[in-house]
Image (cartoon, helix red, strand yellow):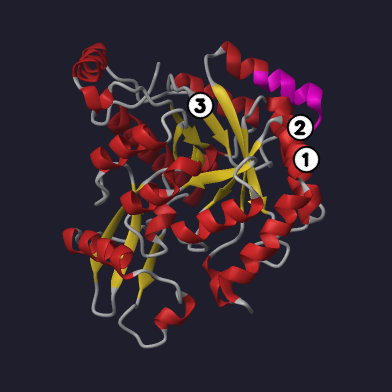
Amino acid sequence: MKSLALAPAAWSVAAAARAQSPALSTKLKLGIDNFAVRAFGWNAAELIDYTASLRLDSLFVSDLKPFESHEDVYLTDLRKKAADQGMGICLGSWSICPTSASFKKDWGTAEEHLSLGIRMAKALGSPVFRCILGSGRDRFSEGGIRARIADTVKVLKACRTQALDAGIKIAVENHAGDMQAHELVDLIEEAGPDYVGANLDPGNAAWTLEDPVVNLETVGTYTVCTSIRDTMIWLTDEGAMAQWTAMGEGVVDWKTYFDTFRRLCPSTPVHIETISEYGKAFPYLKRDFWRVFPEARANEFAAFLALAKKGHPIERFKVPKDVDRNEFLRAHQKRDLEKSIAYCRETLGLGVR
C-alpha cells in the first residue's frame, strides 16, 4: 500500500520542533481509527499492515466486522502481528444501550455484546473497549438522553467485575450528537470511573453545540481513547452549520487542544478519524430547537458561537456524477486521512515513531 510518507527533511524539522518546544515535550501516540478508511473494507490484518505503512503508533479498530474470528488464538496472533510492527491495538464496537435507536442485536443482548468486547479486548492486548450509547436521535426519545444514560449505566454495572478482572477500561464515546461533555461525565461517574472512561471525539462534540476545546477540558481526565477530526463551523440564517473536515481545515484550535490534551490525558493515543462526507445543521434560532438540550449551558454554547463566527461556509461533500462511487470514496478517504496524519506530525508534532 502506498502511504503519504514524509520526506527526511520534514521528519527532521518536526523532530527539531518537538525537541525545542516545551509545549511539545510530551510525545503523544498517533494512530488511526479504521472508520476513516471504511470504504476499503479491510480486515484486521490488512488494517495493521496499512497502519504500519504510515509508521504509526496505534490502530483503533472501532467495530467488530474486520475480525474474521472472535477466538482468542486468532486475536492473540493479531496482537503479535501489531506488536512486531511497533504498534498497539485499541478495540471498539457499537451501542450497548438496549433502548437506543442505534442498538443492534448482532452480538446478542447489550450485556452479551459488552462481555464479548471485554474478552476480545483482553486477547488483543487492547487496554480499552470502546462502545457508544447511541446518537442524537436518542435525545428525542421518551425520557430523553437522561433515560438512555440510566439504561446504559445498568448494562455497564452488569459487566463491572468482568472488566475489572480483565484490566479493561470501557470507553464510552460522545457519539453523533448523543451526549454533551457534562452528560458523559455524569454517566462515567454513575457507572464508576474505576472501570469506565471516555472515548473522546471532538467532531462529535461539535454536533452537541460544543467547542471541542471546552469539551476536552470537561472530559479530558476521563479520556482513555480517541477518535479525532476537524470541523468547520459557520453561522447560517437559522443558526449554524458544522461540517467535518480533514485536520487543519476546520476551525478547531488544535494547538490549545493538544496543549490541554498533554496536561489531562498524556498517555492516551490520538486516533485520526476523518469523516468529511458529513455535516449537520443547528437551527437554534427556531423556537422548539432547545427542547432536546434542556441542560445546555450558556457559557459552553457561547464558546461554540465564537467558533462559528470564525468559520466560513464550505462546499458540502458529494460524489461526482459518472464516476465509480466506491472508488471515489476510497480515494477521498485515504487522501483525507493521510493528509491529516501529515498535518498532525508536521504542524502539531504528534507521534512517537
Residue corresponding to mark 3: 58
**Residue 253: where, in percent of width, then height?**
24, 46
Amino acid beneath label 2:
Asp
Mark 1 residue crowding within 10 angstroms, few (<14) / some (14–19) / many (20+): few
Mark 3 residue crowding within 10 angstroms, few (<14) / some (14–19) / many (20+): many
Contact? badges 2 and 1 (CB < 8 Å): yes
- Left or right of 311? Residue 144 is right
Element type at mark 3: strand
Q: Is residue 260 above or below residue 8?
A: below
The CA distance from mark 1 to mark 3 is 27 Å
Q: Does the magenta stretch include residue 193?
A: no
Contact? badges 3 and 2 (CB < 8 Å): no
Residue corresponding to mark 1: 161
Disc nearer the start of the sequence (3/2)? 3
Residue corresponding to mark 2: 165
- Left or right of 116? Residue 32 is left
> Magenta segment, principal secondary structure?
helix
Disc nearer the start of the sequence (1/3)? 3
The residue positioned 33% from the left and 44% from the top of the image is 246
